[in-house]
């Protein structure tokens, strides 16, 4: 069974008479450990789909079954707890808390769990080491470059060891070398730690890191296929 | 309310906008300072005027007179008073004040005969410094209430001049009775001679009855006894007497209650405003926290804790300062020879701080509720 199953997943917004339908009866399966890229024109519903899978938004109709549970039907508070367990979210604009240091930002998800200070410390240190920023732990976001901020955000997304990482244009605001570093990092999370990765991107080159790319248009999937180029892109980059 | 490990998160938010926090806490502190001062006056009125079940003191005053200058009674009434059933002891007393108007620093002299004074009447006081024997021996000696001594900085052996009366501080006493705390007891004949030379005339008699149940019957008996005499009397329990004598002042103090309520409203508005601004600044941040798995109830508690801290900070500053100032100044409002002290102590600090914290919590509730209600995805799109 796939880790993520969408069946006739639909999202609607009503504005008076108008009905906006960013997602229309979408069917999708994502296996555990997959690396999926979502592409498509602006307004095609990529973020909407990502947010549904991340459990920060709820579908109007259809089913969204993740690890055997219909996430679309969880209550608000159950959904929050579910997110803490399953999802790490990487934003385009990093979204670090500006008054907290890199260390404290990464620590945020762990504060939800009753774990000892020392263990918390170890896990934050491990996550920061993984993204190569152990020496920047006491820096505030404004003291970091965009690429570094995004790496802190990735550390924050993985520190609680979620099964799924979603990323909405994670390199959209970065220059080429920084984007490349981020993509290498995400690829490692997928290959070495087995995280299921779903990434939205506008950039075909970035999409090549993924094993599979899906195209959305007007809330529907238009084509799908396995990407053989993923490995090649990795080689070319390194 | 929230886990201890989340406290640093809240404290970071409080210290985030230092100027805003300082202004808010300063405003709260000012309001709480005023509120506590008002409350101290209200408490003082209660202490000075509310008769308790154990009270056994009656004050005999000239009928229809309300001020020590006009209440004159013959000293020989004492003999008659002592024969009334239920009277344990009685002290004739001449009252002289340094200032007729209501003021914060009136010196009130009470002239009492030393022989009557030493018995029952003195029993309600505790000597905290000096020597009662010396007070008895020296004709110009004064026995000074703790509050008055603190306010005027008086020590044993000081000469002390007020209302044209120069006395020698022989002892300092404390008493549960607010009226004793704020007066100087001197010898009756000394006071009669140094002021109006009306020997044989006193302002009032203070009667101690054998038990509280005699208060009414003795009061009635005294007034009946002198009803047809040249100088009729009006007798009331001491605290009721204070309430009557200071009625105007008490009415004014009662009015300040509104000021107190106003201060509380100001605290609510100040903290509420700061939290609303802070929450608006952080719409996206709260959405991020929710994305990480923080539920809306937790977000609410974080926000409310933040406003609680603002209330606490302002409350501790304001209430602490107010009680400090009032303790240091030992102020009492005095008019017509009776005083209403500012009753400010630890319990008032706790009350003030507690109230301030409570208001902080209340002020945070609505912004917290609003912040947590907003759907996460719209928060991200909003900015
Ligand atoms: N809260 C909302 N109310 C109304 N319409 C919305 C809301 N959120 C999204 N939409 C609409 O849904 C459609 C899809 O939006 P979505 O953000 O998913 O697009 P996207 O593919 O991520 O675009 P982009 O590449 O520009 O990020 C858009 O037309 C958008 O205007
Ligand atoms: Mg988008």
Image (tube, helix red, strand yellow):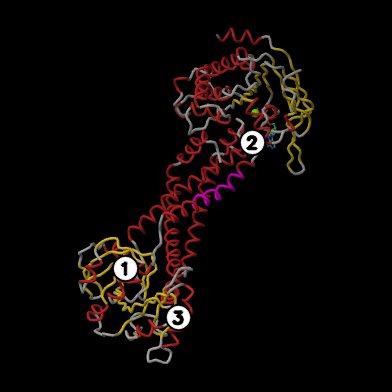
Chain of residue at mark 3: B
In terms of secondary structure, where does tag 2 sit? helix
Q: What residue does disc 2 label? A: B376
Residue for point 50% across, 27% down: A117
| Number of residues whose C-alpha sits closer than 10 Å to that of mark 3, classed few (under 14), some (14–19) or many (20 or more) | many
> What residue does disc 3 label?
B219
Q: Tell me the quarter of the image containing the C terminus of chain B.
A: top right
Which secondary structure type mostly characterizes the magenta part of the structure? helix
Q: Earlier in the sequence, mark 2 or mark 1?
A: 1
Magenta segment boundaries in residue numbering: B356-370
Pointer 1 residue = B105
Q: CA distance from mark 2 to mark 3?
A: 74 Å
Camera-side residue: B37 or B48?
B48
Task: Tell me the quarter of the picture where residue B121 sits.
Answer: bottom left
Q: Going 64% across and 41% down the picture, which residue do you hit?
A: B374
Local packing at callout 2 (Cα closer than 10 Å; few below 14, some 14-19, many 20+) is many
Residue B273: image location, x then y, percent: 52, 49
- Pointer 1 chain: B
Give x and y (percent) for residue B186: 26, 73
């Amino acid at each position: 069974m796939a880790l993520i199953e969408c069946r006739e997943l639909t999202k609607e917004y009503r504005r008076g008479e108008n009905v906006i339908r960013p997602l229309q009866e979408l069917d999708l399966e994502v296996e555990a450990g997959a690396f999926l890229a979502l592409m498509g024109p602006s307004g095609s519903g990529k973020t909407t789909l990502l947010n549904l899978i991340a459990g920060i938004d709820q579908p109007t109709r259809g089913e969204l079954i993740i690890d055997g549970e219909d996430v679309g039907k969880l209550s608000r508070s159950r959904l929050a707890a579910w997110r803490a367990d399953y999802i790490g979210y990487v934003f385009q604009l990093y979204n670090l808390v500006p008054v907290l240091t890199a260390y404290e930002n990464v620590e945020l998800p762990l504060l939800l769990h009753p774990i000892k200070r020392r263990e918390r410390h170890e896990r934050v240190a491990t996550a920061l080491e993984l993204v190569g920023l152990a020496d920047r732990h006491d820096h505030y976001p404004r003291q970091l470059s965009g690429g570094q901020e995004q790496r802190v955000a990735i550390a924050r997304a993985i520190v609680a060891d979620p099964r799924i990482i979603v990323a909405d244009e994670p390199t959209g605001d970065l220059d080429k070398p920084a984007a490349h570093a981020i993509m290498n990092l995400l690829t490692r999370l997928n290959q070495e730690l087995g995280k299921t990765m779903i990434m939205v991107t506008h950039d075909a080159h970035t999409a090549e890191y993924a094993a599979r790319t899906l195209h959305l248009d007007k809330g529907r999937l238009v084509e799908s296929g396995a990407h053989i180029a993923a490995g090649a892109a990795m080689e070319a980059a390194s | 309310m929230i886990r201890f490990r989340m406290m640093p998160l809240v404290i970071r938010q409080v210290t985030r906008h230092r100027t805003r926090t300082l202004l808010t806490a300063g405003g709260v502190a000012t309001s709480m300072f005023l509120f506590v001062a008002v409350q101290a006056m209200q408490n003082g009125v209660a202490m000075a005027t509310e008769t308790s079940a154990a009270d056994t003191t009656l004050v005999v005053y000239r009928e229809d007179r309300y001020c020590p200058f006009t209440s004159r009674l013959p000293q020989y009434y004492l003999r008659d008073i002592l024969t009334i059933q239920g009277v344990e002891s009685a002290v004739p007393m001449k009252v002289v004040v340094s200032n007729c108007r209501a003021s914060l620093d009136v010196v009130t002299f009470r002239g009492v005969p030393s022989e009557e004074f030493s018995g029952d009447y003195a029993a309600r006081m505790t000597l905290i410094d000096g020597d009662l024997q010396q007070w008895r021996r020296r004709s110009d000696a004064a026995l000074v209430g703790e509050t008055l001594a603190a306010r005027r900085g008086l020590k044993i052996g000081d000469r002390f001049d007020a209302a044209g009366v120069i006395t020698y501080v022989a002892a300092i006493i404390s008493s549960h009775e607010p009226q004793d705390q704020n007066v100087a007891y001197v010898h009756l004949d000394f006071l009669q001679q140094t002021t109006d030379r009306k020997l044989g005339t006193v302002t009032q008699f203070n009667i101690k009855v054998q038990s509280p149940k005699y208060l009414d019957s003795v009061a009635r008996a005294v007034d009946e006894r002198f009803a047809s005499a040249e100088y009729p009397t009006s007798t009331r329990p001491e605290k009721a007497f204070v309430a009557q004598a200071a009625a105007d002042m008490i009415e004014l103090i009662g009015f300040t209650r509104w000021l107190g309520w106003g201060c509380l409203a100001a605290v609510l508005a100040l903290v509420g405003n700061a939290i609303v601004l802070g929450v608006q600044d952080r719409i996206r941040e709260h959405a991020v926290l929710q994305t990480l798995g923080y539920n809306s109830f937790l977000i609410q508690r974080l926000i409310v804790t933040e406003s609680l801290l603002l209330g606490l900070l302002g409350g501790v500053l304001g209430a602490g300062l107010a009680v400090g100032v009032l303790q240091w100044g030992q102020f009492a409002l005095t008019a017509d020879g009776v005083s209403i002290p500012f009753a400010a102590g630890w319990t008032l600090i706790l009350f003030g701080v507690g109230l301030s914290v409570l208001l902080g919590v209340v002020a945070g509730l609505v912004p917290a509720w609003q912040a947590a209600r907003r759907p996460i995805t719209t928060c991200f799109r909003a900015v």
